[in-house]
């Protein structure tokens, strides 16, 4: 990673670079061609700072937004749990996860795993 995050058009402030250059398990170094093109044209981080390879994140976002829509928590609480700033951004991030992983059978298995843990209270 280039200091300052100035790689493929990503101009992250130093504090963001510090957060993202932390342990390798939280920062995915490989970029897809879509990520590179998006960065070149000012697309920023389509995953809102979340790990793009976290197969369960799509399902977690869906669950938290559903809980907010049902009135079991506020939108602000849901967004805080997700680390996102708006429902619109959360939905866009869900779309990015869907595009990236939809053809991956492990993505569907992640849904089953997440739902099982959620329903069992884990």
Image (tube, helix red, strand yellow):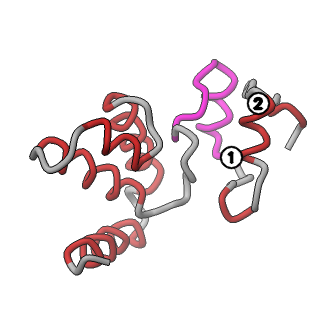
Q: Which residue is depicted at the point 40% across and 49% down?
A: 81
Which numbered disc covers residue 49?
none
Vertical arrangement, residue 34 with respect to residue 105, above or below: above
Residue in the image at 64% along x and 40% along y: 33
Residue 10 sits in quarter? top right
Label 1 element class = loop
Instruction: Identify whether 3 is placed above or below 52.
Output: above
Residue at the far left in the pictured view? 70
Quadrant of the frame with the N terminus: top right
Q: Is residue 87 left or right of residue 48?
A: left
Asked if disc 2 and disc 1 are in contact, CB closer than 8 Å, the reply is yes
> Which residue is rendered at x = 63% and y = 19% of the image?
42
Q: Residue 65 location, x and y as percent?
A: 24, 45
First-in-chain label (2 vs 1): 2
Q: Which residue is mark 2?
A: 8
**Where is mark 1, residue-wise?**
31
| Boundaries of the magenta span | 31-47
Q: Residue furthest right?
A: 3
- Nearer to me, 120 or 34: 120
Q: Position of residue 5 (x, y in %)?
A: 80, 33
Q: Whole-percent x and y of residue 107?
A: 39, 66
- Left or right placement of residue 20 versus residue 89 in this view: right
| Residue 19 position within the rendered picture, expressed as x and y whole percent measured from the top left | 72, 45
């Amino acid at each position: 990673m280039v200091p300052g995050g100035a790689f493929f058009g990503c101009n992250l402030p130093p504090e963001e670079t510090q957060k993202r250059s932390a342990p390798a398990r939280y920062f995915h170094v490989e970029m897809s061609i879509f990520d590179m093109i998006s960065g070149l044209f000012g697309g920023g981080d389509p995953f809102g700072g979340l790990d793009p390879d976290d197969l369960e994140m799509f399902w977690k976002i869906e669950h938290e937004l559903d809980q907010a829509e049902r009135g079991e928590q506020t939108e602000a609480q849901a967004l805080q749990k997700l680390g996102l700033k708006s429902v619109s951004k959360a939905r866009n991030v869900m779309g990015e996860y869907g595009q990236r992983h939809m053809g991956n059978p492990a993505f569907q298995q992640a849904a089953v795993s997440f739902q099982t843990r959620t329903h069992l209270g884990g």
